[in-house]
Image (cartoon, rainbow, N blue to C red):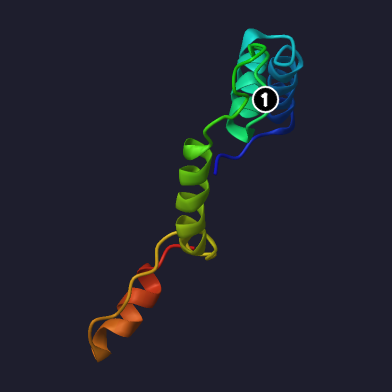
Amino acid sequence: MASYDRDSLAAVIEGAIVTAQGYESSGTAETMRRAMNAYLGKPLGNEQFGRSKQQSLDVADMVNACCAQLSPMLSTDAMVVLEPQGQDDHKKHTVKTIN
């Protein structure tokens, strides 16, 4: 991780705040809001009288299934865990495991 002096850190934080302040009023925020509503199956606003209001949630179901399979891999504190293959490998793998 990069180390910052007080002035550099203040400049980075100020830049992040300025960038974040305009986000809510940007077109990106509205696009993300509409995408999340569609993902969650909320009404899109283009419904027509006499037409079905059912929405397919196939994408949301698949994303949720994939996240459920990935979450055990992401629950460890170590980024990489190397498993020893033999008795003499244990010390080498313990040292090379990245935390």
Residue 21 location in percent, x, y? 76, 16
Residue 46 appears in which quarter of the rendering? top right
Residue 1 position, x and y percent, is: 54, 44
Query: For this rendering, which residue is in front, 24 or 46?
Result: 46
On screen, residue 49 above or below 88? above
Q: Amino acid at mark 1?
A: Val
87 is higher (above) or lower (below) than 66:
below
Q: Position of residue 40 (x, y in %)?
A: 63, 34
Residue at the spot 63% in from the left edge and 24% down from the top edge: 53
Q: Residues within 10 Å of mark 1 (few under 14, many from 20)?
A: few
Measuring from the top left, give residue 51's x and y in whole percent.
Answer: 60, 17
Left or right for 88, reference 65: left
In the image, what residue occupies the spot 55% across and 39% down? 2
- Does residue 61 appear left or right of residue 53 in this picture? left
Which residue sits furthest bottom?
A: 87
Q: Nearer the viewer, residue 82 or 94?
A: 82
Relative to 42, say whether 1 is above or below. Answer: below
Residue 11, quarter of picture: top right
Farthest residue in the front direction? 50
Q: How many numbered discs sit on the rendered protein? A: 1
Question: Which residue has dot 1 on it?
Answer: 12
Name the residue rendered at 26%, 82% in the picture. Answer: 89
Which secondary structure lies at badge 1?
helix
Asked if 9 appears above or below 81 in the picture, the reply is above
In the picture provided, is 55 more to the left or to the right than 87? right
Q: Quadrant of residue 6?
A: top right
